[in-house]
Image: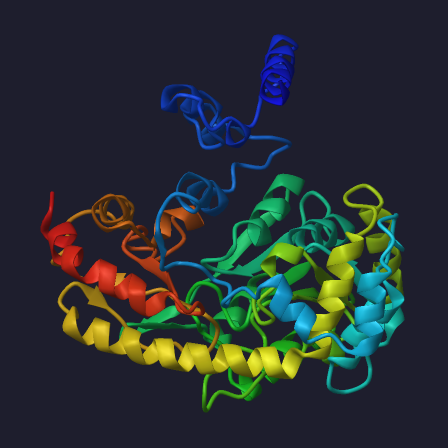
């Protein structure tokens, strides 16, 4: 009877013109599912409010929950809820056990904001300098708070699409700070950023170190130079200094021998830092991140804009995020140990297949962006599509960055993620099929 009611409800929704989630209908035919699929041709060609479809997310939507082996994820091994709750101190356990599922405070749970402020090293960031957001929301509302049509923005390239796309939709000119290729690695040179700023002072400079997807980062000296560039007067011309939006979602995943950079929000008054629990703290399903800035006027604008997006965060997610933050050292160390182990397995795999994939170990983060060798005659997209069909292993082609890889050969790189415990099994599944996919036409 319950199934019949569900069927009737689904038919009523369809009759009213609504789309019914095929995941709720396990008996639906594959052909019918394809007409509702979120990466249909109609969606891929759609532009909404000036925003093009998010190529990376649409690629994941097509494959992520069907491919048995994910070797491209940027997060670290997700925690089980039971694991996280076992780490809770008495205060957090009490908050969890007596949790009201009502609305939460718009800026975020005060205890959570306090814990976030304490995670910064200098003591300059106070809880009032923090607003809790979903990470994507943080990118969106910051762009809306700072930018106007005609503004100039510099972004590291390739980048997570929204870091550039929202600015483009607003009507800004987006210029690329591209890395230089050296010994199969990609490195961002501050001299190139200086040149871009000398050509025209930008309204906003986007940073993302450790960088997704390349795994590149800056030296502490180069990072200090970036801050100095923003503080310069541009030969005495009176104009506002650039804003900095610093995507620090991977800060804390520096590999052995790599020094962690300062948070931009702690060393520059016109900087806003984005961070969260998705990557370093293994809790992407909580959808909890935050923005931190000492600039009070900017914070006021962010608060106003959040009322038009999520308004407030999920009450359960805030408590679970608080637990994770209080155990950040334990979780972070676990992930760095896992990354180090996976990097060893990945290095051995790359050495065995160096005629197919050209690679150099990254210095930070949980992703790398190796290039396909000349042996592979087709695009990274065709290569990855073939591999997932042959082996069930999902890699991410450069085309999902809107062809933001090498400027000379834009779809010749692949993103590999190495933050999950399944990496050795993924490599084992990939190995027997890699060469066949490489030489196929």
Position above or below: 23 against 207: above
Determine the residue located farthest toward the bottom in the rendered image.
Answer: 257
Position above or below: 344 against 377: below
Q: Closer to the camera, 62 or 4? A: 4
Position above or below: 46 against 53: above
Residue plotted at (59% across, 44% down): 168
Give how far across and how far down residue 280 sits, in percent: 58, 71
Q: Closer to the camera, 182 or 16? A: 16
- The image quadrant of residue 40 is top left
Residue plotted at (84% across, 75% down): 91
Give how far across and how far down residue 51 sits, in percent: 58, 37
Which quadrant of the rendered structure holds the C terminus? top left
Q: Closer to the camera, 186 or 3? A: 3
Task: Report how many numbered discs are placed on residues in the image.
Answer: 0
The answer to whether residue 374 is left or right of residue 224 is: left
Give how far across and how far down residue 405 sits, in percent: 37, 56
The answer to whether residue 374 is left or right of residue 171 is: left
Give how far across and how far down residue 257 sits, in percent: 46, 91
Position above or below: 137 against 46: below
């Amino acid at each position: 009877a319950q199934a019949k009611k569900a069927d009737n409800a689904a038919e009523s929704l369809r009759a009213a013109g609504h789309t019914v989630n095929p995941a709720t209908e396990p008996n639906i035919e594959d052909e019918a599912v394809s007409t509702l699929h979120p990466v249909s041709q109609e969606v891929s060609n759609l532009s909404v409010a000036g925003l093009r479809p998010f190529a990376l997310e649409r690629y994941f939507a097509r494959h992520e929950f069907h491919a048995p082996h994910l070797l491209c994820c940027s997060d670290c091994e997700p925690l089980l809820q039971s694991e996280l709750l076992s780490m809770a101190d008495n205060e957090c356990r009490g908050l969890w056990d007596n949790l009201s599922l009502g609305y939460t405070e718009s800026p975020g749970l005060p205890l959570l904001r306090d814990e976030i402020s304490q995670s910064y090293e200098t003591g300059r960031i106070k809880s009032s300098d923090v607003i809790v957001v979903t990470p994507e929301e943080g990118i969106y509302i910051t762009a809306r708070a700072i930018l106007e049509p005609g503004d100039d923005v510099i972004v590291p390239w390739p980048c997570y699409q929204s870091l550039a796309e929202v600015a483009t939709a607003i009507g800004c000119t987006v210029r690329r700070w591209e890395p230089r290729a050296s010994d199969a690695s990609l490195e961002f040179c501050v001299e190139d950023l200086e040149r871009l700023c000398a050509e025209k002072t930008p309204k906003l400079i986007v940073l993302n170190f450790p960088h997704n997807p390349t795994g590149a980062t800056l030296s502490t000296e180069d990072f200090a130079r970036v801050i100095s560039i923003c503080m310069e007067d541009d030969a005495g011309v009176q104009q506002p200094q650039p804003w900095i939006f610093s995507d620090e979602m991977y800060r804390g995943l520096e590999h052995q021998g790599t020094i962690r950079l300062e948070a931009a929000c702690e060393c520059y008054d016109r900087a806003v830092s984005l961070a969260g629990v998705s990557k370093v703290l293994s809790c992407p399903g909580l959808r909890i991140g935050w923005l931190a800035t000492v600039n009070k006027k900017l914070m006021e604008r962010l608060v106003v804009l959040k009322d038009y997006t999520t308004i407030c965060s999920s009450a359960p997610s805030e408590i679970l995020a608080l637990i994770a933050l209080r155990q950040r050292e334990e979780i972070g160390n676990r992930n760095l140990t896992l990354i180090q182990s996976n990097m060893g397995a990945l290095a051995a795999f790359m050495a065995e297949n160096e005629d197919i994939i050209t690679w150099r170990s990254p210095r930070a983060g949980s992703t790398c962006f190796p290039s396909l060798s000349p042996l592979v005659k087709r695009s990274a997209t065709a290569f990855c599509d073939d591999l997932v069909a042959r082996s069930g292993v999902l890699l991410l082609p450069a085309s999902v960055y809107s062809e933001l890889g090498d400027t000379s050969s834009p779809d010749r790189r692949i993103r590999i993620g190495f933050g999950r415990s399944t990496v050795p099994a993924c490599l084992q599944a990939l190995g027997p099929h890699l060469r066949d996919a490489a030489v196929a036409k």
